[in-house]
Image (cartoon, rainbow, N blue to C red):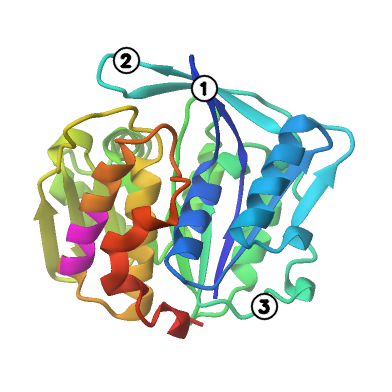
Amino acid sequence: MVLVIGEILIDIFPDYERIGGAPFNFACHLKQMGVPVRFFSRVGNDRYGERIMNRLESTGFDLTDIQIDPAHATGTVQVALDADGVPRFAICEKVAYDYLDLTGIAANGAADPAMIYFGSLLQRTDAMQCQVQALLTAKGAPVCGFCDINMRPPHVNNQAVVESLRHADLLKLNEDELETIQKMFAAPASEADALHWLMEAFGIRTVALTRGSRGSRLHQGPTKIELPSERPPRIVDTVGAGDAFAAVLAAGLLRGHPLQETAALATRFAARICEIPGAVPDDPCFYDDLKPLMEGACNAR
């Protein structure tokens, strides 16, 4: 089982609205691939919260894992797209997911996961950082910590970034996030050297760097994989492409799928996400290309 904690929100585009949030996107993709997943988040007692609960129920998530906040609104993000569909985000503060209560997760039947997925946006406040880090500190050594760093200035808590890297067995980040981390730690200037330094400095087993139109780079021990991007024929927006990549990577690692093949599938799936509005498809058939990972995925505990 994969335990996912973090934000679920409404992405408000100029012409449409979609349910989003990196943890939700990640969890939803895993669910569609047949990987057992528990998703813990918090929404407001409002129309957006109701819409989210309806979507989660129709997708098969356990609604008891979603807290309803009577005092704070469901999270929203204003999304502006450039000519290439690349987004800029204006993220609302002091929303429901900023008050997520993680203290009862183990008692809620979510103990002993194979993987815990977490990010840094949920930890933008000191209170949430303390909760997330307590949860990660309590995890056993066999549990894989998947950190999708997800740094969205000005919503970056530097101490949370440091502590999250220390708990990461698998790290996914993009070029902008790598550059920020390089400056924070005076890490090596070159991309490859910086990734190697991250693995050595924080004991990270696998690092995945997404580079937009320049493809991706994966480091796992001595193995280094570099893949070109697959540009789709039509780009609606690029929101959630990194989350799609992360979900396929996680599914592949949990199932022991070859890293090179997993990375290629992740690259292809991320490109296809750019062809739809928002980060998560409505049609389950969208996942048919991932059948090499989906078959037997229920064996992931």
In contact (CB < 8 Å): disc 2 and disc 3: no
In contact (CB < 8 Å): disc 3 and disc 1: no
Helix, strand or loop: magenta stretch: helix
Quadrant of the image occupied by residue 95 = top right
Q: Which callout, 2 or 3, points to the residue nearer the camera?
A: 2
Task: Say whether disc 3 or disc 1 marks the residue closer to the N-terminus.
Answer: 1
Viewer can see residue 198:
yes
Query: Would you name the residue on which mark 2 appears?
Result: 82
Task: Say whether disc 2 or disc 3 marks the residue closer to the N-terminus.
Answer: 2
Query: Would you name the residue on which mark 3 appears?
Result: 111
Query: Would you name the residue on which mark 1 appears?
Result: 16
Q: CA distance from mark 3 to mark 1?
A: 38 Å
Q: Amino acid at mark 3?
A: Ala
Q: Secondary structure at mark 3?
A: loop
For the record, the magenta segment spans 261-267
User: Front-most of 66 and 274?
Assistant: 274
Q: Which callout, 3 or 1, points to the residue nearer the camera?
A: 1
Is residue 81 highlighted in magenta? no
Q: Amino acid at mark 2?
A: Asp
